[in-house]
Amino acid sequence: MPLIQLVGILSLAGTVAAVALAVGGVALALLTKRPRLARRVAVGGGAVGVCYLLALASVSGASHEVILPEGEPKQFCGFYLDCHLSAAVIAVETAAQLGDPAHPIRARGRFWIVTVRLANDARREPLRFEGMRYRVRRPGGRWSVRVSAAETAIGSDPEGATATSFAPGESRTVRVVFDLPADVAAPVLSVKEGVPPDTGIEGLLLGDEDSAGHAPVLLALTPPRGA
């Protein structure tokens, strides 16, 4: 796990503990009719929370977007002390239409069929991908979502591929399809993983890609030659 994420986990845990103690201290002070002490404890707890939020904003603001080349995996770490799950783009195809030639599904622009390798590199523990989300960002910042009908037409079932846990060392491939403008250049793939409450915790975690305002890690999409 990157050092910044370990520091983030410890910092968040410490902040939550400090704020919880402050809340308990305020309640006790009020019960014992010591309002001045209650105010002091409340101010102290609030100061800890504000300092953490300022640190979160600072770390996220200093982050930079990363675009990984084809074949290089993006690691998913999150709130847990492991980074064993990953996703990597291993192939890209394009097509004007997909499915049965007699009744094809035609793209408005051009279909991009992206093959993604999902892997668990843990040595002993089976792990599971939860809530996988795939989107493509085009130049100018516009986003494209998957075309489920096109995926069905090529026999792809991304959700089914992650419905069960991955054994230690296991990898699987999924194909996700997007309908992009015919003249699109340098699109990138966003792959995210996680479900509540984990995603809510990660939104407050220093140095995590999913923390508020943090720059993303994206996967480059290179079309085949002649496409």
Image (cartoon, rainbow, N blue to C red):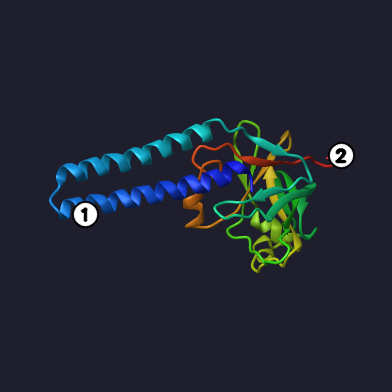
Q: CA distance from mark 2 to mark 1?
A: 70 Å
Determine whether, in the image, residue 65 is placed left or right of residue 13: right
Residue found farthest to the left:
33
User: In front here: 2 or 226?
Assistant: 2
User: In front here: 67 or 104?
Assistant: 67
Residue at 30% from the left image edge and 48% from the top image edge:
22
Residue at 71% from the left image edge and 61% from the top image edge:
122
Q: Secondary structure at mark 1?
A: helix
Mark 2 neighbour density, 10 Å: few (under 14) some (14–19) many (20 or more): few
Residue at 64% from the left image edge and 67% from the top image edge:
163
Residue found farthest to the right:
226
Residue at 61% from the left image edge and 32% from the top image edge:
64
Pick the quarter of the image with the C terminus. top right
- Which mark is on residue 225? 2
Q: Secondary structure at mark 2?
A: loop
Name above or below for residue 11 compared with residue 171. Answer: above
Three-letter amino acid code of the residue under disc 2: Arg
- Which mark is on residue 72? none
Q: Is residue 204 visible?
A: no
Determine whether, in the image, residue 131 is placed left or right of residue 226: left
Three-letter amino acid code of the residue under disc 1: Leu
Residue position for label 1: 28
Q: Earlier in the sequence, mark 2 or mark 1?
A: 1
Name above or below for residue 6 compared with residue 184. Answer: below
